[in-house]
Amino acid sequence: MAAPLTLVLIVAVTIRAALFRSSLAELISERVEVVSPLNAWKRVVEGLALLDLGVSPYSGDVFHETPLIIYLFHFLIDYAEIVYMIADCITAVALYLAIQHYNKNVFRKQKYALEADRYPHDCLELMRSPKEMYYIPLQVAMFYLWNPFTILSCVAKSTCGLNNAVIALFILCTIKGSALLSAIFLALATYQSIYPLTLFAPALIFLLQRLYIPVNLRRPSFWLFTSQYAFMYFGSLAVIVCLSFFLLSSWDFIPSVYGFILSVPDLTPNIGLFWYFFAEMFEHFRLFFICVFQINVFFYSIPLSIKLKDHPVFLMFMQIAIISIFKSYPTVGDIALYMAFLPVWNHLYRFLRNIFLVCCVLLACSALFPVLWHLWIYAGSANSNFYYAITLLFNVAQILLVSDYFYAYLRREHHLSHGLYLKRKDGGEATLVLK
Amino acid sequence: MGLLSDPNRRRALTNLLTRLNTPICVVCYLAGLAWFMGLAFEPFTLRTYMSENAMGSTMVEERFPAGERALATGREFAAHKRKVGGMPVDWLVKTMQARGLEVYTQRFSRTLPFPDENKERYIVHGTNVYGILRAPRAPRTEALVLTAPCTEGNNNHQAVGLLLGLAQYFRNQVYWAKDIIFLVNEHDLIGMQAWLEGYHHTNITGMDWTPLQGRGGSIQAALSLELSSDVITSLDLVLEGLNGQLPNLDLANLFYAFCQKIDILCTIQGKLQRSDWDTPSGYTHAAQTMMLMVMKQASGRPWGDHGLFLRYHIEAATIKGINSFRQYKTDATTIGRLLEGMFRKLNNLLERLHQSYFFYLMPSLSHFVSIGYYMPAFGLLAVILLLRVSSFNTFSLEAHALDLWVQLGTPPPGTEDGVGGMEQSSSPSVLSILTPVVISHMTGAALFTLPIRSQEMAVEHFPVSETEAVVLTAIAIYTAGLALPHNTHKFLAGEGTEKGWRVLKLVALLYLAVLLGCTALINFSLGFILALTLVPVAAFITPHVPKAFSATVMVLLSPGFTLLYCVFVYQELQESPVSLAEGWILFLSVISQGILDHSLYGSLVYPLLALFIYPCWLLFWNILFWK
């Protein structure tokens, strides 16, 4: 399998290299869909310039990346394009390895369950065969590397690609079962953009499962491991934050990175839901609604963790998707990360109901974004409502997509425990209704 | 959400949609057409009204007295122009300086990609002369522009004269809060383009021009004046700009309001408005006016010098004086007063014109249709595409799922949403779909690049002029594209399965829907006209329909023929019908103008047609000949 993966990587790198050299690169790096105030390359360069001048890069409200990033590029500024291409490749390879490992586990579990005769007999067609699972890791790598969203994000040199790489490494370490590395990468991801905090729950559940510790609040072993993992996580987070402090010897970055993410002062249009609301809102409601919007991102982790406590990897996918939909400065690069997971759930395909509709809407929206932007900003004939309407539609489609997968996953699990052909009490064919 | 999650209701809906698909499509098409035609009916339109506060409530008094002197200046200008044999730059500079303006010139040159036979120009050198009247009352951060093109031949002297007269008069007034720039541009649009690019420090089209030495503030509005006789009977307002962009409706309202006030006959599309909207002839008149606007907007070319301003976010319109055989004549003083009034109102603006509509169609100067009213006409056509996507193949498959997608992936006979025998369906290889898509797009790219690239070669080998060479190459490539299905087949080597064309059609339908949707948003008229001809083709083409007949229909509804019809319809609407041969000549010149518009001003219609619409149509052509 190494050869196809290499081929995928080579093609992906070629496309990116060609685009970096073309005149499109500049155009792409200006698109609001691709870069946000947080991760725009222009701002990183500005921060570097300030740093070189001996001024704090956070003075002047332009730069909002973390100190580690600025020091990374302090040394690698000349190789930025290569760094971004490597970051994408790392993400793809990490996801590839992670999914390979995960699929092995899934198959092994299925085999045990079959041998123990735990599935109803009519569920045989729901079983997964090694044949169909064989290409999934490769598809995941392909979905990530060849996704136009990823390519755009990489060509725009949005630091989102680096964040994705960290998250992918975190997933790999978690699935491979290394608690320490997983905690470190999770801390790094959190340090980069706060929101991956919600991935703590799925990672913990996964690691607990792996050690055969049941998620039971009365067991001391559960609490022991949880505190261990939390200690590793918060410890490494503290180390990273302190390291940043020593790099710049000031705490400027805390308000300017995390304050910026949480309080959303920059209302440049993007594909998220925040900008329009807060541009329209009266100032004295702002704090309240900021709290509501931000809690919204974190809130779903509680019900989802309870519902999906046996399926941590799917939970992880859900969390990443929710983050990328509801975060304050989303870009297409964030969407690409969760879209890379879609091939993993190929077996849910038969239970998906609106996938086609959703795909069409996502596709149409992606085409309409630049058109409406042109009408609003260049032609001056449309206004922000046009653009926001498309943003809204785009997000509704994403939410539908995610909830469709959620429903399909639950439904398959239901069938696996209750049999595929459900009978009503009167003997007729039953249908499952989601209400 | 019940509709999306409840399988029973879904099934009911999809059953309905698949069973009645064809009738629904036909009804939608007719409804879309009827809706569009209904837009010209006066009770369905809105009266225009001034939205901008700064221009609405304040009264201005127009006192411009010097019409005769302006005409005399115009005659002097004509004499100097004849003497110099072009733009009398020195004279203009001196005259403007004498009127107290800051005068600057800008030289520009441009080589056209091929000779323009309509205007007989190839290598263009010219000079723009402009004078700035500095605002006495405010910091010089904003400006207004009055332009008069200095055209070849014996036209437009009166406009230049009036411009100079107004400059002299304006110079003596104290109330100007915005700089006023008086511009006389040579070689109409090319000069305008050079001046605008120079003013805004951009270079979009690769033209050579000398940088501007003087600037006013950011331009808020511009008026372009075209007059060809000393007295006129009516003034015509031209709004359509580059890529079908229109200025804010308030500009049209302003013009209309002043025409009413000063009592000048005003027209749009050269058509007076009539009050008898409830008679058939009254309705026809309104429909003609609107259709003319649609045709002009769809062409995507600037219909006056104002057209290029719109790209820079500047509201602009052209005012054209028309002298016909009416009794009632208007003299230059009155036109001067009209312009003075309009400029004084524009001078009162506190912010850019933005209150009123940007998307509108006008069946008469006093009525308009806004985007909310005309979009449904397009929406009804576009929904056909989506309906066909959802179930165009009901004849052959039991369709229970809403989507063709589901049918393609898992055809579940008889069972409800997904729970059913998973049939092993050999999905058509990506290659068999990708090949036609790539080949059609390469044909499109050839159609876009080759005509200009290969003109020299064509001129060497055939007895044609460069312009003819370009146009004929374009037509040849267009026709050669029709031979493609047979070529594609050799590549595929018998891979054309039943499922293959379904997927291809699905892709093509979605592609067309997105394409037309985007086009209609930017340029409604173009989107609508293309939808009118392409949607029936897209909806009903399968490999199983009778070949010869459908092929003829398809060719007759192809984008090229649409253009040909548009030429005839336009002439018909202008009330100057042409014979077939004349129409053909006109068609050829329209093609060359389209290509020129793209390379000179960056009009998007030609690239859109060549790179996207035509390849998309070729995909349907491919489906028809799918084996």
Image (spheres, rainbow, N blue to C red):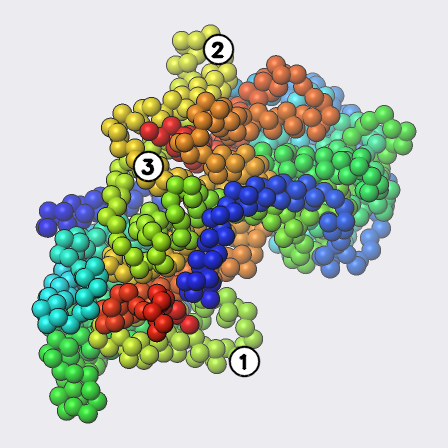
Residue at the (39%, 41%) spot, across then down = B396
Say which amino acid is labelled 1: His
Residue with the mark numbered 1: A284
Judged left or right of residue A75, residue B442 is right
In space, the residues marked 3 and 1 are separated at their CA atoms by: 62 Å
**Residue A386, numbered label:** none
- The crowd level at tag 1 (other Cα within 10 Å; few <14, some 14-19, many 20+) is few
Badge 1: chain ID: A
Q: Earlier in the sequence, mark 2 or mark 3?
A: 2
Q: Mark 3 or mark 1: which is in front?
A: 3
Give coordinates of residue A80: x percent, y percent. 24, 54
Q: Which mark is residue B498?
A: 3
Q: Secondary structure at mark 3?
A: helix
Q: Are marks 2 and 1 in contact (CB under 8 Å)?
A: no
Residue position for label 2: B464
Q: Secondary structure at mark 1?
A: helix
Question: Image height check: is A202 above or below B68?
Answer: below
The residue closer to the viewer here, A372 or B580, is: B580
